[in-house]
Amino acid sequence: MGYKKPVSGIPVPSTPPPKDYNSHTHIPLDIQRRARENFRIVDLDSNGFISRKEMTIMLRGLSSATNVEEDLNMWFKNADFNLDQQIDQDEFINIFGYLMGYKKCEPSP
């Protein structure tokens, strides 16, 4: 997975994880905990989902850049696995782990 230089200054996935990348059991528990903590911070209305509006607020809060639309689109393109235009906690943990370098191990032949 590559990374693009983010406008906001935080890592932005430039390519999606593999299609079967829907389980976070391979991500260490401390990383999952950090992801959950970050998710709760970004999920401003505590409804269990991060909306585009909430992600925009986060991106703007972490950057002096005023145009974060490109980063926002990249996040939703590559993290919103079920394409419902919101990022749930599992999707967030998966992309957080992926950005931290925890990729699924391929089974040995």
Image (tube, rainbow, N blue to C red):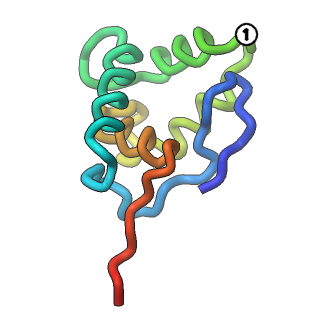
104 to the left or right of 57: left
Q: Residue type at mark 1?
A: Ser
Which quadrant would residue 84 be assigned to in this image?
top left
Q: Position of residue 22 (x, y in %)?
A: 32, 54
> Horizontal placement of 56 versus 3: left or right?
left
Where in the figure is residue 15, as x and y percent of width and height? Answer: 60, 53
Residue in front for this viewpoint, 99 or 56: 99
Q: Quadrant of residue 69?
A: top right
The residue beneath circle 1 is 64
Placement of the N terminus among the 4 image quadrants: bottom right
- In the rendered image, the vertical position of residue 98 relative to residue 106, given as above or below: above
Q: Secondary structure at mark 1?
A: loop
Placement of 76 over or under 54, stated as above or below: below
Determine the residue positioned at 35% across, 37% down: 31
From the viewer's perspective, is 52 left or right of 84? right
Residue at image coords 44%, 43%: 95
Up/down of 32 relative to 44, above or below: below
Image location of residue 59, percent across then percent down: 59, 18
Front in this rendered view, residue 109 or 87: 109
Q: Going 37% across and 14% down the picture, which residue do you hit? A: 41
Residue count near mark 1 (Cα–Cα under 10 Å), binned few <14, some 14–19, many ≥20: few
